[in-house]
Image (cartoon, rainbow, N blue to C red):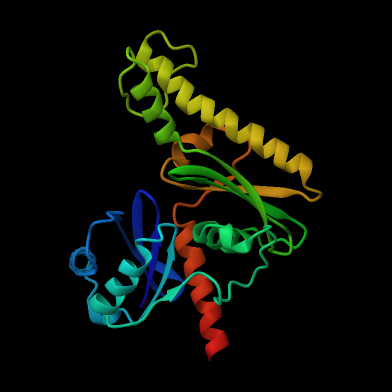
Amino acid sequence: MLLAIDTGNTNTSFGVFEGAELVHHVRAESARNRTPDEYAVLVRQMLALRGVEASSIDAAIIASVVPTLTPTMVELVRRGFGTTPLVVGPGIKTGISILYEDPRAVGADRIVNAVAAHAWVGEPDKGVIVVDFGTATTFDCVTPNGDYLGGVIAPGIKISAEALFARAARLHPVDVQRPERVVGRNPVQSMQSGIVFGYAGLVDGLCDRLRDELDYPCRVVATGGLARLIAPETRAIEAVDDNLTLTGLRIIHERNQRVRG
């Protein structure tokens, strides 16, 4: 079995693949002060609750956007599962070209998402835009050839809301959920409207601008924690894939295994 690890700024996802099928998926906080041994115990226990024995994991791959946690995740795999993981970065075969001015400046998760999204489109004349609702909200453009072109980084929904609550003395934290109407009749409804419908408008506006700038048709897929909340309120997003990053990690691992084989 393959253990795929996606380490983000807020959470780390651990996916277990049996062949092409994601059979288990667990999540933990991306705690910078947690040791490799603590992570190893935590992940082994979470997988054991789902009937996955540590000995059944014979390969692993990591994508991390938290440099201080990358060595921790590598050691977690070595100590907890007795294997050395692949780490997405220079020297790893992704199967796509990175057309960013400085390829090293692109987050590993954005490259992994591009790989999975290109496979999802499966049409040689269409590109794809990936909208990832993470700590930041990112928009990544992939050409019909599967090349990573670049994109947009906007403040994430939760950190934007937290900034609003922190700076406005009379506004208090609210649950991020869809209100019944756009016109709020109280502060809670008004803030929920601004957060949900405001971000839906941001998504549609940026996707329209990206499509206008690109010289090929593009499909749009979303992923990330709040994708299923925002996507139904947009015109642009066609599909939501909660496991897009994990799928991309599996594809990249397979490509590197073929090269080594």
Q: Tell me the residue at 73%/64% (across/down).
A: 145
In the rendered image of this protein, does residue 40 appear above or below residue 206? below
Q: Position of residue 240 (x, y in %)?
A: 51, 47
Q: Nearer the viewer, residue 74 or 218?
A: 74
Q: Tell me the residue at 41%/61% (across/down).
A: 67
Q: How many marks?
A: 0
Quadrant in which residue 4 is drawn: bottom left
Task: Say whether residue 177 is visible.
Answer: no
Q: Nearer the viewer, residue 17 or 102?
A: 102
Q: Position of residue 247 (x, y in %)?
A: 48, 64
| Lateral position of residue 105 relative to residue 33, left or right | right
**Farthest residue, direction top:** 185
| Lateral position of residue 65 relative to residue 150, left or right | left
Q: Tell me the residue at 31%/24% (across/down).
A: 173
Quadrant in which residue 92 is drawn: bottom right
Q: Nearer the viewer, residue 216 or 24?
A: 216
| Lateral position of residue 110 relative to residue 187, left or right | right
Task: Say whether residue 205 is visible.
Answer: yes
Q: Position of residue 193 (x, y in %)?
A: 46, 20
**Farthest residue, direction right:** 215
In the rendered image of this protein, does residue 142 appear above or below residue 179? below
Q: Tell me the residue at 36%/78% (across/down).
A: 1
Q: Position of residue 232 (x, y in %)?
A: 52, 35
Quadrant in which residue 115 is drawn: bottom right
Q: Nearer the viewer, residue 238 or 71?
A: 71
